[in-house]
Image (tube, rainbow, N blue to C red):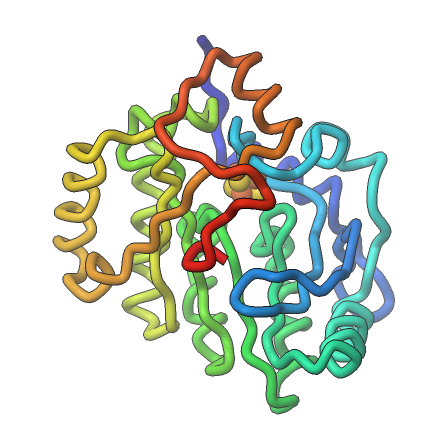
Amino acid sequence: MAFYDLVTRHMAIEKLVTRAGPEGLERKYYRIRPARWYGGIVTADCVGCGLLCRFCWVSDVVMNHPCDVGTFYTPRRVAESLISLAKKCKLDLLRLSGGEPTIGKQHLLELLENLDGKGYRFIVETNGIPIAYDEGYAENLAKYNFIHVRVSLKGCNEEEFAFLTGAKPEGFKLQLKALEKLLDAKVSCHPSVMASFSTKKSLQSLVERIGQISLKLAEEIEIEELILYPHVVQRLRKYGIKYYTGYAPERVPPEQV
Ligand code: SF4
């Protein structure tokens, strides 16, 4: 199997899902919605990711045809939409999800600028890759003390990473590098790991590996488990990928929500 280069792919996707506009860099989104996660959070789902995780909950059309879905938003328009929905739903937590939110750095930074001082907490859910390869990204994020970055690791080591994403195995090191950079820049962050495909032994070795970066981060590892949406199950079958754990969408345990 030929693995793709994930930095090249992130940059190529960026060209498809961002564009320069009169108010700054615009980014494609396909949905803005209230979601049940984190006890209630207003979420803008962006289009486009440089990885192709086999277990990704994003639909095949959003994942494979970023040019055909979504609408370009200015940073100001996303901020206003998030705030307006948060007020309506009486929620004070916001996030970007869907695709990879750190693609289109200027867009994300201007969005954060628009949210600064408005009294919301903001979660950046990321695969960490752009933070790792773009010098200065973590420092740029450090300016915004109302954010928290959740770096979602794809498996527990290089081999699992390649198996789950189809990307070159060394990409896993970039995910860990992102955590190091965020830590160095003093950005609030924690790692999560998709552990449904991992043995206890490989999970333990990940905990030890992250412990070498920071014992605190190792203690804070969040375990992510597969949500068995029908299209995800179908995709896993197509790739012949077996999992140890997973939940039906309506049976996700409260501690995972
Ligand atoms: S990094 Fe996240 S958004 Fe991108 S393909 Fe993987 S699970 Fe989906």
Q: Which quadrant of the view contains residue 175?
A: top left
Q: Is residue 128 left or right of residue 62?
A: left
Residue 171 in sight in this render: yes
Residue 50 in sight in this render: no
Q: Is residue 137 left or right of residue 245?
A: right
Image spot of residue 251 (x, y percent) = 53, 45
User: Toward the viewer: 170 or 162?
Assistant: 162
Image spot of residue 126 (x, y percent) = 50, 53
Q: Quadrant of ligand 1?
A: top right
Say which quadrant the N terminus sits in: top left
Determine the residue positioned at 65% across, 89% down. 118
Q: Is residue 146 above or below residue 233?
A: below
Determine the residue positioned at 86% across, 51% down. 71
Determine the residue positioned at 59% across, 21% down. 235
Image spot of residue 246 (x, y percent) = 45, 35
Q: Is residue 25 above or below residue 223?
A: below
Q: Is residue 51 above or below residue 208?
A: above
Q: Is residue 106 above or below residue 127?
A: below
Q: Which quadrant of the view contains residue 93?
A: bottom right
Determine the residue positioned at 83% across, 40% down. 69
Image spot of residue 31 (x, y percent) = 78, 54
Kindly give the residue lying farthest to the front in the view shown.
251
User: Toward the viewer: 39 or 41?
Assistant: 39
Q: Which quadrant of the view contains residue 40?
A: bottom right
